[in-house]
Image (cartoon, rainbow, N blue to C red):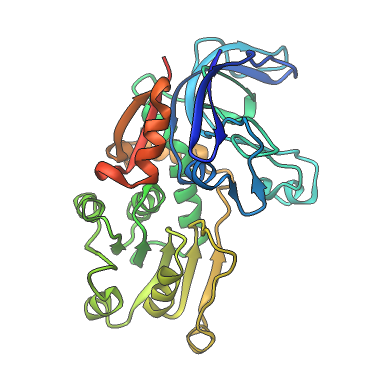
Amino acid sequence: MRAVQLTGIRQMALRTVPDPLIRRADDVLLRVRAVGVCGSDVHYYTTGRIGSQVVSYPFAVGHEAAGVVEAIGPGVRHLKPGDRVAIDPPVSCHTCDQCRAGREHTCRNLKYLGCPGQLEGCLGELLVMPEECCFPIPDTMTFADAALIEPLSIGVYAVQQSIPMPGAKVGILGMGPIGFSVMLPALAAGAAAVYVTDPIQRRGDLARAHGACWAGNPEQTDIVVEIAQREPLLLDVVFECCGQQSALDQAMALLKPGGKLMLIGIPEFERYSFSAETGRRRELCLQHVRRQNACVQPALDLVTSGKVAPGFMITHTYPLARTQEAFDLVAGYADGVLKAMVQVD
């Protein structure tokens, strides 16, 4: 099959590699149709690592995907060739303490698509995954929209882990795909007001068009002052979605006493810092969000019910042979990109 592999820092190659094989009874062979370019993929492309996860070249990234079932192992019970599916990228062991506690997303033996040392990514024509990672999608859903289910599931999980949404005053700092993936389910769950920030004007405009009550550029305005003028009691919850120290500082200043800060963005630095006095005096709660847990089907349900329509996030589409152009576009925040999608034909 054809697959796109990282071959060095900011280097990629389209290569012919061996087809993946069904090896376990519950394996499903998939023909990949769409792959979303995620910010974490771009981290590996531009720096060769995320924290302790270091790329050994050549390596294929990619974990936001959808496709068609080509063949199934003898133990597969709920899928058949021809079924259209969205793909959940983690493969958990189901036996460790985390899995037994219902925390399969922090499995001690987790294998994740496109993560160095774990599983080769899905930027290729074929992919093998366990049946439990394959979620049927309706014929009315495009493969590109189905590939958005993975980031949307992270947003659904983050909202679930935060606070009850009905009537909530919400901040989202960083309106990349994850920021939008938080905003849409927050609004669907009943958030009363959503304030968003991003230095890219088009993203703020898109957020307002899809339900945000206010959008500001943190590089051009004091967003804490602006939001506080509109919400003197400040916000109930803030989702930090860009991995920036400045955003964490803003989030702390925006939270009311008893408020909750959700850390979702992946920083490129080693340590955050925050005001001990602000956190202590306001009794703020800080929670990290690690991908998602059992939220793929709820995300699919939101889309199929019409409560959430994330397709507008796809701003650019490339064929497999031009994958590097897609990565360069996203890495440079060029041409108003929000989500670049790779079509695999």
Q: How many numbered callouts?
A: 0
Please, is residue 173 above or below residue 18 in the view? Answer: below
* Residue 29 x/y as whole percent: 61, 16
In the rendered image, is residue 88 in sight?
Answer: no
Q: Residue at x 46, y 49 (%)?
A: 156
Q: Could you tell whether 107 is left or right of 59 in the image?
A: right
Task: Name the spot of residue 175 as percent of width and height, x first.
Answer: 34, 54
Horizontal relation, residue 75 to residue 342: left or right: right
The structure residue drawn at horizontal position 40% and vertical position 61%, both measured from the top left corner, is 165
Residue visible at 21% across and 55% down in the picture: 201
Residue 299 in picture, x, y percent from top left: 45, 41
Q: Name the one closer to the observer, 320 or 66.
A: 320
279 and 8: which one is in front? 8
Residue 60 or 151: which is nearer the viewer? 60
Q: Is residue 38 above or below residue 265?
A: above
Q: State the quadrant of the C terminus.
A: top left
Identify which residue is drawn at 19% across, 53% down: 205
Does residue 22 appear in this view?
Answer: yes
Look at the image and tell me in which quarter the N terminus lies: top right
Vertical position of residue 144 compared to residue 256: above or below: above
- Can you give x and y, in whole percent of width and height, for residue 54 in the image? 65, 45
88 versus 251 height, above or below: above
